[in-house]
Image (cartoon, coloured by chain):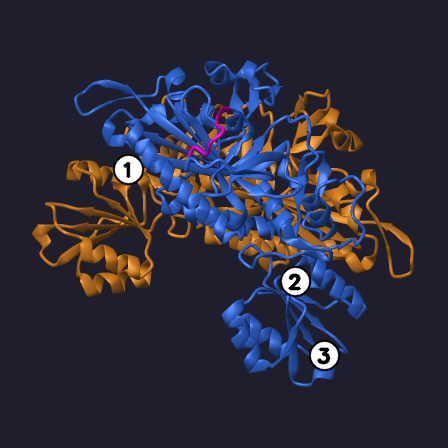
Chain colours: A blue, B orange
Amino acid sequence: MITHRSKSFIYTDHKPPKDEAAVNAKLLEQACYVRKLMAGVYTYLPLGFRVLQKINQIIREEMNSIGGQEILMPALNPKENWQTTGRWDDLDVLFKLKGKEGKEYALGATHEEVIVPLAKKFITSYKDLPFYLYQIQDKFRDELRVKSGLLRGREFMMKDLYSFHADEKDLEKYYHKVTDAYFNIFSRCGIRNKTHLTLASGGTFSKYSHEFQMLSADGEDKVYVCQKCKLAVNKEIKSETPKCPECGANDFKEEQAIEVGNIFKLVTKYSDPFGLRFKDKKGQDKTVIMGCYGIGLGRLMGAIVEAYHDQDGITWPISVAPYQIYLISLDNKSVKDLLSQLDRNGFDVLYDDRDVSAGVKFKDADLIGLPIRIIASAKTGDKFELKYRGKSEAKLLNNVQLIKELKNNG
Amino acid sequence: MITHRSKSFIYTDHKPPKDEAAVNAKLLEQACYVRKLMAGVYTYLPLGFRVLQKINQIIREEMNSIGGQEILMPALNPKENWQTTGRWDDLDVLFKLKGKEGKEYALGATHEEVIVPLAKKFITSYKDLPFYLYQIQDKFRDELRVKSGLLRGREFMMKDLYSFHADEKDLEKYYHKVTDAYFNIFSRCGIRNKTHLTLASGGTFSKYSHEFQMLSADGEDKVYVCQKCKLAVNKEIKSETPKCPECGANDFKEEQAIEVGNIFKLVTKYSDPFGLRFKDKKGQDKTVIMGCYGIGLGRLMGAIVEAYHDQDGITWPISVAPYQIYLISLDNKSVKDLLSQLDRNGFDVLYDDRDVSAGVKFKDADLIGLPIRIIASAKTGDKFELKYRGKSEAKLLNNVQLIKELKNNG
């Protein structure tokens, strides 16, 4: 697909915004991926929406591959459900509102309060278990500090998966499956090598919960990475256990990190208050065992930018880049044939057809950060210059060579 | 793709729910497409989510085909933006809330208050015009009466497109393009033949606005369809104009209808209060001219069900059906080969592999309403029974004939 820059809602700004401290927000605003509406609340512009869709699709595929069934729950939640779990009063980030008829609502900060009573309406027997429901949907949290751009928001898109089991053994099995799926997601988003499974405090019901922490100098979290087995632990766990719970080694390195995912064994924490029960094989009444698993999509996008940028702009991994190719034509060189060839071969191209200087186009190409830049110029005759973002050397290739190269690397 | 019914979160109920009056809600709840969380607020279950995605994709393709660029705006809106237009006080369905730090928010009931100041941050010149931005996103409206199932909700998914022009002539041109795109959408969703372009009062800035009204016995609206040219007018316009504004005829038929889309010439209604201006070719300062165009996705889904059902259940058009084929195997007849053949040929199949009676499966097939039912049975040897939902005659086809038939009609 070919998109003409001159017809696109893309307005870059080479000066960083004054009201953003985080690198991800600065670059994403400068390159016109997102725009802040107010603290912690962003609009995704056409470029940013495309990245969001790519991440969305990767997550969806991985969730479906572990049996996840996609649903969509409302943001508007009845007060009663949140009272049942005690979180109407206890969850301090919960947004509350009152409707015209005096009815009170919460804005979903997470969705146990909706999905557990939903499941209760349908399931009755061990034959109904296990099952796995997920959604990709906006969450609302009244956070006090929202200075980290897309990393922490008051409204943010989240994938939340909930699993329902007959016993803890089955939960344990699925929990490992989700862990693998999460690493697949981070791998496909290009951040697997920086992301560590991290033990965190599990609350009342489970010894540990697990976070996925991506090491990043500006991250909000502090983690301790075992230099032998690469498991990480958070501060709380580090205080409790001087040795690595995984391999027993005692060589931790302190790092700053961004939490890019988390998984919890809820066990009966939410099925209990709602009375989500089932009849087992012997006809006995039992409580459903649950797990929950979250990934913030905007946060993941922000984390990718924290990991992939240089002094000139973003350096997207190709899997989540809004387009693969940034095409620049100089000296009015015709690119008509090239465009139709690229289109025919299924490449997504942002063609900078604006009437501005070569310098402006080059700077924009770097800032926007598509993985491949192609320059067509009268000076290079029937050859095109191909350069990968972040690499300095360029290649001169003719038509056939160019398409071949792109097919191998695009 | 093959989905096994036994592993799916699908629980049908052949008794209609007591707390639903509208046909669409009754059938969609009974067939496990949606579940009501509270009045006017629904969860989309796996079947319903698939329909929503099909509708989503149809709308997205049609919006992209008229130059629409997809974005995503937040539901959480700052109070100030709604004060600027006066709608903080005037829009009675606006949900309002207060955050921890005393900051007040509106939940987006529509998005002029976000998109106009957004556009103002970027555009300066006639060279930036026209452009068209749309999103598919949840809206919130504190409606008093929400008895029509998916037709009127307090939270609902909407496609809202906004167009920005240098003059009214350009708006007029695009307005017609959107009208055509809307009819394409309704055509692809199977309701074009029942849907009439309808003149409604346009408010201060335009003589008429236009609604797309689908005739339906239980619809909330009343329209008057010109029997000569098929244009419709609403009650208000009918009082003003005894003759058809399109063809001059005087032969209206009163009908009940569901509004499945609407388009407005906003002109400067929202660009004025925010001061959204541009420099024209002569360097003169002018106000941007706008249009806005909405389609509710849940409402459209509900309207399709109102148009497509019979006494046994839903009768989905194939374009929006969650799967194309409902496959039933009787007498333990193996369908292994058939399943892999259907999968290989790209069909989406819901395979009812449950250990329940044939009667239960037949009733569910009708209620869920997939366009094609296939029965494999030992009694019919190497032939399969194919029946289209809503038709009484069935065909007996062998393997090769079956795939051929499906390729022509699936």
Residue A148 lies left or right of residue A317; in this view the side is: right
The label nearer to you, 1 versus 3, is: 3
Instruction: Find disc 1 in the rendering and name its residue.
Output: B312
Q: Is residue A208 above or below residue B285?
A: above
Alpha carbons under labels 2 and 1: distance apart: 61 Å
Q: Which mark is residue A377?
A: 3
Q: Residue A392's spot in the image, x, y percent?
A: 68, 68
User: Residue under mark 3: which chain is it in?
Assistant: A
Q: Is residue A284 above or below residue B381?
A: above
**Magenta part of the protein: which range?**
A240-245
Q: Which mark is residue A390?
A: 2
The label nearer to you, 3 versus 2, is: 2
- Residues at discs 3 and 2 in contact (Cβ within 8 Å): no
Is A242 part of what is drawn in magenta? yes
Residue depicted at 69% across the width and 85% down the height: A381
- Element type at mark 1: loop
- Element type at mark 2: loop
| Residue A222 vs residue A246, the one in the foreground | A246
